[in-house]
Structures are given as C-alpha cells and as structure tokens.
Image (cartoon, grey):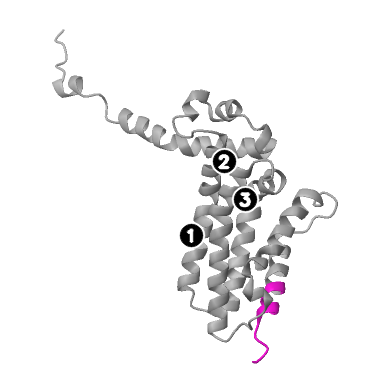
Amino acid sequence: MPTKSRNPDTLSHPPKEKQPRRRRRKEARPGEIISAGLEEFADKGFAAARLEDVARRAGIAKGTIYRYFSSKEDLFEAALNARLTPVLGGLDSMVDSFPGTTEELLRVAIARLHKALFEDGLHVLMRIIITEGNRFPNVAENYHRNVISRGRAMLARVVERGIARGEFSPSAATDLPVVLAAPAVMAIVWKMVFERFDPIPPDRFAEAHADLIVKGLLSRSG
C-alpha cells in the first residue's frame, strides 16, 4: 500500500497554534498571579498572606512568582496598580473632557468611585491599607504615591473647575479637596465593621456622598 507523502514543511515547522498558545500563557501569567494575590490578600490580609499560597492559587511553582515580582510588597503594589490605574485614568480623562456642569461631573465621578470600591473589590485593598499600613510603611507609601497623590490632584482639578465657572464657592473644603473623599472612607469602614449588623446598600452610600459634597460646595451667589 503506497504511503502518503508528507509535506516537508510540516516536519520542519511545529504546528502554529502551539507557539501562540504558549506565548499567550506566558503573557497572561502576571495577571493570573495578581488575581491570585488579590484573593490571598482578601482572605488573609497583607501580613498573613504567603507567596507559596499565592502560587498554589495560581497553579504555579512559587519560584515562578519571582520571575515577575520581587517580593510580596511588589505583588501588592502591582495588584493595586492593576485595579486602580483604570479607575483613576478613567476619572482623569473624564475631568478633562466632561461637557456638563461640575456638579454633574462630581456626581458621576463619585458614582464611579463607589462602583469601583464595592462592585470591583477595591475596598479589599483599602481595608489592608487602613488596618495594616502602619505596620508596613512601604505598602502605605506605595499606596500614597499611586493612589492618594493622584486622587488629590484630580479632586483639586475638579474644585478649580467649579470655582472658575462660578459653580463652587471657595471654602475650607475647596482649600483641602482631599476631604471630599471622606464619605467613601466611611463607607469602607462601615462595610468592614458594621455591615453584618446594619447593612447599607452601596448605591445609597454613593448618593448620600454626592449630595453631601455637592451641596456643600455649590456657590451661594446664584
């Protein structure tokens, strides 16, 4: 029986699907490690989280983590950036291009912030900063650099916009715009401590936050 002739090209080159699949797997691995790290941090907190348990969740050897992250602190910072960069970047872009009033801008921004915190799980990272930041100053410093500083700058731009347009009155709050984020911190603490006794839906927190801030900033001259 005659044998089927083989195409020499199929012998000299491996199937094309395998290489892209391996590349995709390698490119996806940092994200998989970050996701596993977030689960571990959420369950254990920062101090008790162990990289060997992160590796187990990700289905990899512990040594693989060190190809991408130099330490647990490095992994936490990467997790922080992965979750917060899209949120802060989106809010930054919105401040630059928002067509409506500054009141409308603030209400939309606050709603997005609360969604990120409670629907996308960012409250877990903030809970770690609140409860463990004092014990791990490098973690707190990274959070301040990557989140607090950027958030303060963005809030300052929103306030400047409102004052320039005559929508907001200058006040102690406009001099220190970081206080405008305070109700979100209260919402996180409430979720951490009191939610099981007295649950408050996140959308109600967001609406109350927006009302408190906007009504306190609006110009009295109009």
Q: What SS does tag 1 mark?
A: helix
Q: What SS does tag 3 mark?
A: helix
Quick one: quadrant of the C terminus? Answer: bottom right
Residue on which disc 1 sits: 89
Residue at screen point 35% across, 33% down: 23
Q: How crowded is mark 1: few (under 14 residues within 10 Å), some or many (20 or more)?
A: few
Instruction: Name the one closer to the observer, 168 or 196.
Output: 168
Residue on which disc 3 sits: 122
The tag earlier along the polypeptide, 2 or 3, is: 2
Q: Position of residue 173 (x, y in %)?
A: 67, 74
Q: Give the range drawn in magenta.
A: 212-222
Q: Which amino acid does label 1 sit on?
A: Gly
Q: Where is residue 210 in the image (x, y as percent from the top left)?
A: 67, 71
The tag earlier along the polypeptide, 2 or 1, is: 2
Residue at screen point 16% across, 18% down: 6
Instruction: Name the one closer to the observer, 94 or 119.
Output: 94
The tag earlier along the polypeptide, 3 or 1, is: 1
For the residues labelled 2 and 3, the Cα–Cα distance comes to: 12 Å
For the residues labelled 3 and 1, the Cα–Cα distance comes to: 15 Å
Q: Residues within 10 Å of mark 2 (few under 14, many from 20)?
A: many
Quick one: quadrant of the N terminus? Answer: top left
Residue on which disc 2 sits: 76
Q: Does the magenta stretch include residue 166?
A: no
